[in-house]
Image: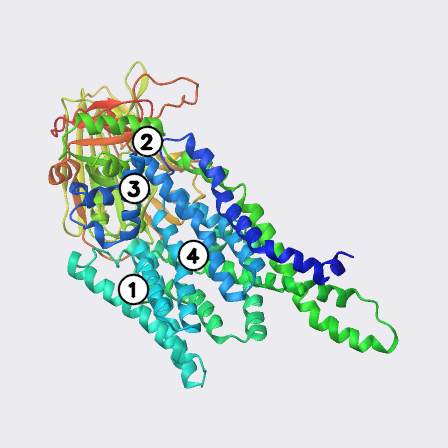
Amino acid sequence: MWLRALSIPGIQSALKPHRSNTVYLVLAIICIAPIVSVCIYWSARVFPYWCDGGIWLKYVNALVGRDYPMWGSKPLQIDQLYFLFLEVTRLLVRDDLLALKVTALVAYALRPATTFVLARKLFNSDLAATGAALLSGFYPLFYEALGWGGYPNLLGFVFLPLAFYAILRWIEKKSIKNIVFLGLVTAVTVLSHDLTLIVFSGVLILWLLLAFLSKAWGSKHALDQLLAVGFCLGIILLIEAVQLYATGLPSFDLFNKAAFYQLRVTLGDLAWAAKNPVVAAYFVLVTAVSLVAIHFTRRDGVRMMALVSWMAAPLLMSQVGLFGVSLDYRRVFFFFLQPGLIVVAWPLAFSTILPKDLRQLFATPRGPSLPKYFRRAAASLPRIVLVLLSVSLLVVQVGIGIPFPSVIHSWYNYIDPYGDSEKLQALDWISHSTQDRDIFVADEAFGRWIEGLASRRVVMYAAPQFLFMKGEVERSTAARTILESRFEIRNDLARICYQAPYGHFAPMISFVNEGVYEDVLYASDMDSRVYISNATHSWFEQLSKFAENNSERSYSISGGGESGVLQARFVIGSIGLSEQIVLNDSGIVALQYDLSTSDSSLRFSNITIPLLSPEGIPFDEVYAEGANMIHARSGPIRFSVAVTGETLGARLVASDGSNMIVLSFAPQSSGQSISAKITISADAQKKTSEVLAVDRDDVIRAYNVSYIAIPRLSEPQVNGTVPLRPRSIPAYDHLLSDPAFEIAYENSRVIILRIVSLDLK
């Protein structure tokens, strides 16, 4: 009955005057609804999520002359439009953090609107355009961009649909007005975001190639496409030439080894973007079916070529690693999803003829009209199936997206060790209590905000695969040395971090996996023990007690060739301990412990040296091969632990599920000396490389560092007590005991250390 009612001309005429207003009202709701929950969460927060907002503030500050934290790079080399947008917003609201939130939410809210404009142009359907806008508004990937702080990325997503809309409009009607509009939209798209520029250029080049081939095949619109796309590429070249003249070459590092390996695109990235592998596979299916249907039903080569180019170019560009070029391949790949969301909404354009299709499908066939019924059903059924596929995907994906801001909120609160209001308190102290030219060391989560809000230069540790500006990887390596090591030996195969006498990573051993140092295991001098006896009783000493003896300890470190060597000597009373740690150019680590005593009444019973997994997470696999060899796996890295030397009585104790490998060594024949030699090697194929030996104090001097910022652990310990002494995460905790530093500022989540002396005590 309702199908017949909708087909009555009088009802359709009555609804028509109000249709446009209704559509725009629905579109306004779609633009606003996705950001409502984010606004609620952000209203209770000082900072937006994560730390990329600090980068944008740093660049905007550089625009107005505060360019000290920039390390020599220029602010107008990337994302120029967003920085201008942020600066104008900051002037209006007079609050840096509020300006970040406003620009992020505005960019997010505008995306569904521009998606709607392009989708309606492509399919001439309000319903299909509304469906595309709805998917765009609630798709989880875009919430992720809000989470990590990719606000210029969101702005690029706003203007890309407008750019394609302008191209199609000029192809349809060549006028001065349309070509001016096309030039302006192309310019703002190029200036919105550096990665958007790269992808947009790639799409246009592919479109130009396809248009050229279609001209050779006799397409009547090929010349129009060549002119429109060529005009856009000309605008891009002109803008880039002006920018190059004004600011010089962008300081991008396109050969980041870690990015080359770690950011390669996999099918898992699509599942991550959709937040469900089944939904991701369904998305691919609906996209493919819809593209085929568009080709055979609409017969519009221009629109089809635009969609194919837009979808294919990011997929192809995400594979430029085959040519040795390093990009953030995953974010390039994600540009494929924006046109994909438009394509999967296209079947909703059949809504105008859906009532007719349903009547034909459910009509009761009579007598000889049965063949005619089947012909009509065969014509209508594919359209009905397409609509069902599109609607079901839309419902499922929007259903995932609506509650997703709560997931983003929980996750980014969880991974931020510095808190929210505590971060602002610490930054206020930095701004008012340190000098403008002071240099800090910090990790990314806090260092970005030091740069952006306090305008101090930061030697910053961040995951190297996400660093694409020249000098960032080198500074990240230096920061990690300062934060985690007292001495360090490394090459491009392995890294040895040594913290004694103030920390208990003695040493932490990391092996390289796909360009990144992965912590594998460490020997803790606090957990390593030597068992001693005399004529009356037996006892043990922790090896950390030797290192803590201020009067009798010494260190030496050397490297720069085929091996790096760290030697340490400690004495307690009549007992001496020598440690030697060696990394060779094949990535093999050797640990040597030698104890001896000059007291004839003392005897060594044994020494136990446990090798622990980082953060207490159990090794994935542990199994023994004979008496002197253990094989294990920690995440992606397989490694072997071998016991060699004169101490043949060594026994290895390990089991699945344990988070340590315990090595026990017997004394030499006299009982007054004992040695332990351990060799650790990764199972991956080795290659030779130069070994560097690094003294942390030399790195601090080289960068002229004044302060170090680290997180403070405020949660109760396992037994429910809160420690009286400030504590930080295990990798940084040694800094709090080192007399080279003193606490200059602290609150419940942040500690800032001042460097007072670099002499090892």
Q: Is residue 350 left or right of residue 662?
A: right
Element at label 2: loop
- Point out the tag, 3 or 1, that comes first from the N-terminus: 1
The answer to the question of whether label 2 and label 1 lie on touching residues, with beta carbons closer than 8 A, is: no
- Point out the tag, 3 or 2, that comes first from the N-terminus: 3
Give the Cα separation between the discs numbered 3 and 2: 15 Å
Q: Nearer the viewer, mark 4 or mark 2?
A: 4
Give me the disc on residue 334.
4
Q: Is residue 544 left or right of residue 717?
A: left
Give the Cα separation between the discs numbered 2 and 1: 36 Å
Q: Which residue is mark 2?
A: 730
Mark 2: which amino acid?
Answer: Pro
Q: Is residue 342 visible?
A: yes
Give the Cα separation between the discs numbered 3 and 4: 35 Å
| 330 or 580, nearer to the observer | 330
The answer to the question of whether label 1 and label 4 lie on touching residues, with beta carbons closer than 8 A, is: no
The answer to the question of whether label 3 and label 2 lie on touching residues, with beta carbons closer than 8 A, is: no
Task: Say which quadrant the N terminus sits in.
Answer: bottom right
- The 10 Å Cα crowd at callout 4, few under 14, some 14 to 19, many 20 or more, is some
Q: Is residue 20 left or right of residue 488?
A: right
Q: Is residue 676 visible?
A: no
